[in-house]
Image (tube, grey):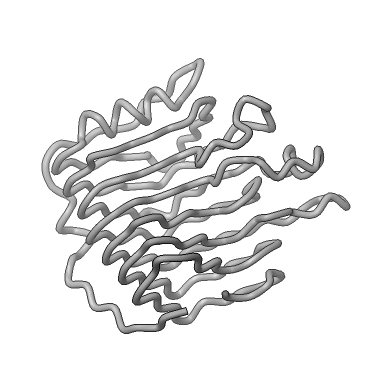
Amino acid sequence: MVVATLALTSSVDAAAVGKTCVVANNKNDDSLGIIQAFKDCQSGGTVVFPKGNTYNIRSIIKIEKLKNVYIDFQSKVNMPRFNKKFKGESAFITLKGDNVHMSGGGSFNGNGQTWWDVKDVTAPTVLRVTLKNSQLGNFKILNSPRAHMGVTSCQDLVLHNLYFKSASINSNRPMNTDALQISSTTNLLLKDSELIVGDDCTAINGGNTGITVSNVKCVGGHGFR
């Protein structure tokens, strides 16, 4: 593990410019509304998940080529319940881009209990990001079926004020529920967060430089590695 000081000058407000795109609900699959909002505000826009809204995704979401985008994330987003069609997928939601900022206090519900009860450890990660010059914070991931978040091939990324918690309601405990999996990333700061998970709080894999963890509480997991 390499520990370094990460200093980024970008601010959340810097990305909150341009067009505003509110995520619409879809009776069949809210993935469609999410994908459309990001498409409409792909460059220099603000994607809004309004407070009080709930979205149920039933498809894999891949968002790419974001540039100067702010995500106002105040809603609840439910991942699918256990379904064999999702086995082995990389992530339920993937974000890729440059100068992306997310905040707002919203939450992702992984519906992990439905995977733990069938003892299936092949679920997708809830959220995977490949971002440059970005900041994500002030959101929750609850009951992830496997890893909560993946950081892959990122550069100059700040993660702050995260709350991840996966806790079973029966004897089928959370399996392989790493809080944060990091690979091929340069200059990452994880700070001011609480991680209550059934596996590693950080899994720092190959190809990383400049990883800093500051003021992060790890509960019930295997620690930082």
Name the residue at the top extreme: 28
Relative horizontal placement of residue 133, taking residue 144 as reference (left or right): left
Residue at (51% x, 29% y) in the render: 57
Q: Where is residue 52 in the image (x, y as percent from the top left)?
A: 46, 40
Relative horizontal placement of residue 179, taking residue 83 as reference (left or right): left
Relative horizontal placement of residue 1, taking residue 187 as reference (left or right): right
- Against 103, residue 206 (above or below) is below
Residue at (30% x, 26% y) in the render: 36
Q: Where is residue 121 in the image (x, y as percent from the top left)?
A: 70, 45
Q: Where is residue 223 in the image (x, y as percent from the top left)?
A: 63, 75
Q: Quadrant of residue 47?
A: top left
Quadrant location of the C terminus in the rendered image:
bottom right
- In the image, 218 versus 224, the foreground residue is 224
Residue at (21% x, 46% y) in the render: 69
- Against 147, residue 218 (above or below) is below
Name the residue at the right extreme: 171
- Against 129, residue 24 (above or below) is above
- Against 114, residue 69 (above or below) is below
Relative horizontal placement of residue 193, taking residue 43 as reference (left or right): right
